[in-house]
Image (cartoon, helix red, strand yellow):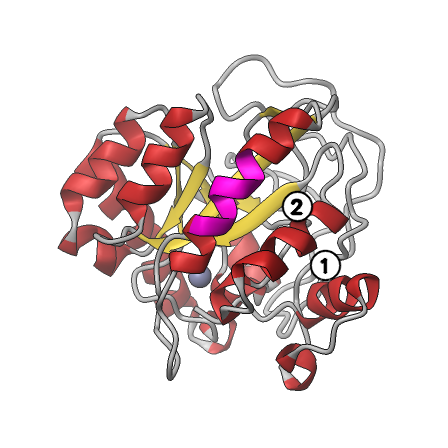
Amino acid sequence: MTHVSAVVAVFAAALLGLSTACASSPPSAAPSTTSTAPGIAAPSPSGSPAPPPSTAPAPARPKTTSPRPAPSGRAPSTPGAPTALVTTTADSGRYVALTFDDGPNPTYTPQILALLERYGVHATFCEIGDAAEDYPGLVREVAADGNRLCDHTMTHDEQLGTRTWEQIYAQITDGKQTLRSISGASVLYYRQPGGNWTAAIQQIAADDGMQNLSWSVDPRDWSMPGTSTIVARVEANLRPGSVLLMHDGDGDVPPGGGDRSESVAALAILLPWMIAQGYHFDFPA
Ligand SMILES: [Zn+2]
């Protein structure tokens, strides 16, 4: 579950003048918080005609292994989605995209859904296959409410990039199929646990028709820094086009982890704040 994004955290901490416990965390594979450049074009997940491909370069993408040459942003002849990481909203106006990881969770997912419904907001939920099998009703509820589903592997393997091709393929494709068979909904995105992307992971997910969904704002809510800190980090870093990472589930709960009540409380503050700031809500693309 550890969405280790020390770069983001350090950036946020610097902005806030905070000294966080994140400083000793492993290096991040997350993109910069400033990576909000519009025009990282990808086919519309809704299936509508795709816009012309952007000529903008793909965002820098860390890789820990390279089983094959790193794609420069688009696979040359894959029938699936582009391999590039998605870090922006589909629309380039004053939009943000909310994403929630590691659910479904019987305690927190319903609270998140209730908040989203109260404000008429839709989000993307990156769900773990094993948790989905434990709580299929929640998966269906997430989709029925108009939210989108995102494959987050079967077991939240943050070291997936070090596994064999067959193991990577199984984690990604089984995760997608689990969410799809439970919900009946399309699974449009894949998000690598921990943000530990590799070329193989991105290619397999793209070949399975999913966009590789990263993020651009990470308040590290999973580390339970306090509701006010989560709120402050988001308020300091949110920009038009931002993809915000938060958590409704507990993933592979670290010692003392797993409590998402701060995330819920922060969202209750952030949703009216975002609306007051003139933000509208979109899906990533
Ligand atoms: Zn996760």
Dividing the image into 4 quarters, which one contains the N terminus? bottom left
Dominant secondary structure of the residues highlighted in magenta in the image: helix
Question: Which numbered disc flags the more N-terminal residue, 1 or 2?
Answer: 1
Near-viewer residue (146 or 205): 146
- Quadrant of residue 25 within the rendered picture: bottom right
**Circle 2: residue type:** Ala
Q: Residues within 10 Å of mark 2 (few under 14, many from 20)?
A: many
Residue ID at (30%, 35%): 142
**Tags 1 and 2 touching, CB below 8 Å:** yes
* Disc marking residue 61: 1
Residue ID at (54%, 61%): 200
Q: Secondary structure at mark 2?
A: loop
- Quadrant of residue 122 within the rendered picture: top left
- 260 horizontally vs 69: left or right: left
Q: Which residues are magenta?
A: 265-271
| Above or below, 257 relative to 215 | below
**Circle 1: residue type:** Arg
